[in-house]
Amino acid sequence: MRSFYTDVDKLGQLPTTERLRALKRIIPRAKIHDILRRTGHAYRRYLRLPAWFMVWFVIALAWCSRDCSRQVFKWLQPYRRNGTPGRSTLCEARRRLGVAPLRHLARMVVELLGTPKTPGVFYRGLRLMGLDSFVVHVPDSAANDRVFGRPGRGPKRGGFPQARVLALCELGTHVLWRTLIKPCNTSELTMASALLRHLEKDMLLLWDRAFLSYDRVRQVCQRGARLLVRIKKNLIFQPIRRLPDGSMVAKLYRSTQDRKHDRDGILVRIIEYTLNDSGRSGAGEVHRLLTTLRDARRHPAKRLIMLYHERWEEELTIGEVKSDECERPVLRSETPAGVIQEIEGLLLAHYVVRVLMCEAARRNGLPPRRISFTGTLKVLRCRLPECPKGRTGLKKWYENLLAEIAEEILPERRNRINPRVIKRSVSRWPRKRPKHRSIPQPTKKFRDGIVVLS
């Protein structure tokens, strides 16, 4: 009987949807339950922390990255006496949830937010997309080291294991539409083909020069998408014809032998340019772009040169995830499954913030880029605990939330550049080695270990 009353008391402390109802427009609870049914979690018995709540809890870990797990729980739930679980209870609930629900939810929920009327999203009917990767530091545990690996070799190995995330980004709204998580030593070039299969016909893909290869260009063309990329200076292209704007039509080949025999070439357009502004990086150097947009009248060379720099919007998006949202230098999870779950939650949390920004911008006639990501994140952290219970109050709260986000307007970007340098000094402490992981622990209390020398 005692265990029965204990269970009833625990069930009385089950999390409520009071504060989470405010965000059901972005991630509907019905979709969460659908995912939980597909992954088998809906049929398991959870006494205190149901699976639907833990999905939101993992997402909230990214919004409040500096807070401990128990504090994040308090952000999501109103106060109840003895109602906050211990750290081990929350960690065990995360372990039970696993990776699958977060991964499937991201595939189902994350959508492209831009419309033809959204400023900066389309170029002549083509949706601007970017492809790039970034790494995140994960805790220095033996399991994470074995699965994710570290950058570098020998004495120059990195201090922490790292996970690599490759993302296909909608540049106009900063939405990380499709992502892939791998160990840090997995090349982003080998990961790219898995994301290129998601391209659609109305997309214009921008990437950096390292991604260029015959097979990837062919894959983009087979998907019906267009391409605008930077290329290396040493690649050989023989002009087929010169265009009025100075660019040329040429063919991209798989190998030197294919070029020699004119076999299986892909028609592309090459644009060469330089900069005569001494205060801008790359001034005086020759830069080259490759594009499948071969109509020089419809797509002038100078317009495409300016358009290519939209690729840096994904760099800003990566900064939002790594610096603004995830304020801690190293993730929390010491197991590989927990790391992947945490990264999926991090990306979902970024999407929720971006949806709020896009909706606030649309209602106030602003481009999404003019809304501050950091400001929106802080508004959400501040206002989420204030969410009321009633439907009328909830609607008013949501409208006020969007109005407050719309006030976080960024000024127009200044015409300036910053050097890409490291400001941190090298530490004078020795590097952490495997021998430092299992150092001997004290066997006595400090008092008992004192020996006064005479």
Image (cartoon, rainbow, N blue to C red):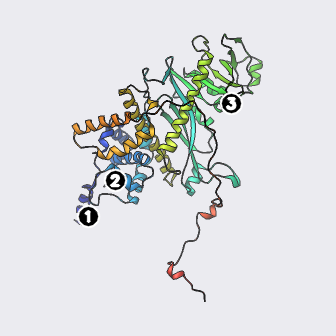
Q: Quadrant of residue 255?
A: top right
Q: Quadrant of residue 246?
A: top right
Which residue is disc 2 drawn over?
74
Residue 223's place in the image compared with 59, above or below, is above
SS at badge 3: loop
Q: Amino acid at mark 1?
A: Ser
The answer to whether marks 2 and 1 mark residues whose Cβ atoms lie closer than 8 Å is: no
SS at badge 2: helix
Residue 314 placement (x, y as % from top left): 54, 33
Q: Amino acid at mark 3?
A: Gly
Which residue is disc 1 drawn over?
3
Residue drawn at 33 percent across, 44 percent down: 384
Q: Earlier in the sequence, mark 3 or mark 2?
A: 2
Closer to the observer: label 1 or label 3?
3
- Horizontally, residue 282 falls left or right of residue 408, namely right
Residue drawn at 69 percent across, 24 percent down: 276
Residues 406 and 321: in front is: 406
Tell me the crowding category of disc 3: few under 14, some 14 to 19, or many 20 or more residues within 10 angstroms, Cα based. Answer: few
Residues 272 and 28: in front is: 272
Tell me the crowding category of disc 2: few under 14, some 14 to 19, or many 20 or more residues within 10 angstroms, Cα based. Answer: some
Q: Earlier in the sequence, mark 2 or mark 1?
A: 1
Task: Answer whether residue 33 is visible to the viewer in this image.
Answer: yes
- CA gap, disc 2 and disc 1: 27 Å
Residue drawn at 68 percent across, 22 percent down: 273
- Horizontally, residue 128 falls left or right of residue 30, namely right
The label number, if any, that marks residue 282 in the structure image:
3
Q: Amino acid at mark 2?
A: Lys
Q: Quadrant of the C terminus?
A: bottom right
Residue drawn at 37 percent across, 30 percent down: 359
